[in-house]
Image: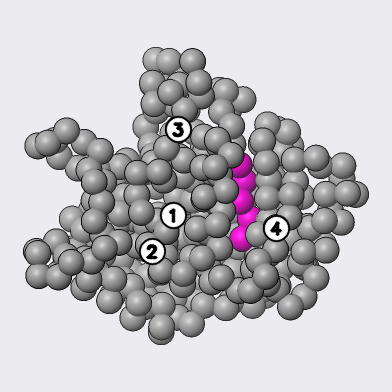
Amino acid sequence: MDSSHALRRASRENPLRLDDLKIAIYIPAYNGASTIPKVLDRIPEHIRKIAAEIFIVDNASPDNTYLVGLGYAAQKGMANLRVYRNEFNRGYGGSQKFAYQHCIDNGFDLVVMLHGDAQYAPEKIPYLLEPFLYGEADMVFGSRMTGDPRAGGMPLHRYLGNIFLTKVENWVLGWNLSEYHSGYRVYACEALKKVPFHKCSDAYHFDTEILVQFALAGLRVVERTIPTYYGDEKCYVNIWKYGIDVLLTMAEFWLHKHGWRRVEKFEVERVLPPGEPTPVPALAR
């Protein structure tokens, strides 16, 4: 039985093991020369060994992110660590499009997105992978908002903005997620094949648009609590532009849903039989 078929048949009674699956860890990086080694060091040893590929995508950084990644691979003798460099800055979403297509083309079962700025805890990778072993998810993301984000240093304006945007998104989509704005995610590659993610934005609200696509397709989304960490790393997200982009995405979806405007990126074929309700996202602590 191939591993993608096994992933669909997994259950609580018949769980998979991590080494049954072909797993990729994707690390998006921009000006990450100082943080990439820390992120790689913190990936649990057994995960480093079973991952078929750990790959950094340097998004045309002006610093030496690319060389640092290559040097780390050589120094540690990690044959499964590869570094790719975009010739121009493709944007946060554009970099994800490259990464997910790479994983699909190379037959991976799961792809973990772990940011290269050390904001998310690599130690939580096994925890985020767990629902897939029981056949319970098509996507898992780490939620900061079910923990204590303020204690982890989340600035007040980001905290309040997250709450506001999430309320709007839940109202529009009919979901009850604790947040939509975490970048710590794991996707099943078979699920990625079912949504037109290449039509999503190249900007930061790619993460919101692909969640809308998963909702339209009836794919299963699970959120798990993760710690929040805000350090001294520079953030390249324009918060105000991001918030407006998310609200515009919700408006586009609303118009598309009611047939008032055709939005190509939201023309997604449902994977469920006709009449079967869309799965409600679940929180697994």
Q: Residue at x 50, y 21 (%)?
A: 2
Q: Which tag is nearer the camera, tag 3 or tag 4? A: 4
| Pointer 2 residue | 200
- Residue 80 shown in magenta: no
Query: Label 3 vs label 1: CA separation?
Result: 17 Å
Query: Label 3 vs label 4: CA separation?
Result: 27 Å
The vertical placement of 204 against 7, above or below, is below
- Whether pointer 3 and pointer 4 mark residues with C-beta atoms closer than 8 Å, the reply is no
Q: Which tag is nearer the camera, tag 3 or tag 1? A: 3
Q: Is residue 174 visible?
A: yes
Q: Position of residue 242 (x, y in %)?
A: 41, 77
Query: Label 4 vs label 2: CA separation?
Result: 22 Å
| Pointer 1 residue | 143
Secondary structure character of the magenta stretch overall: strand
Q: Secondary structure at mark 1?
A: strand
- Whether pointer 4 and pointer 2 mark residues with C-beta atoms closer than 8 Å, the reply is no
- Residue 27 shown in magenta: yes
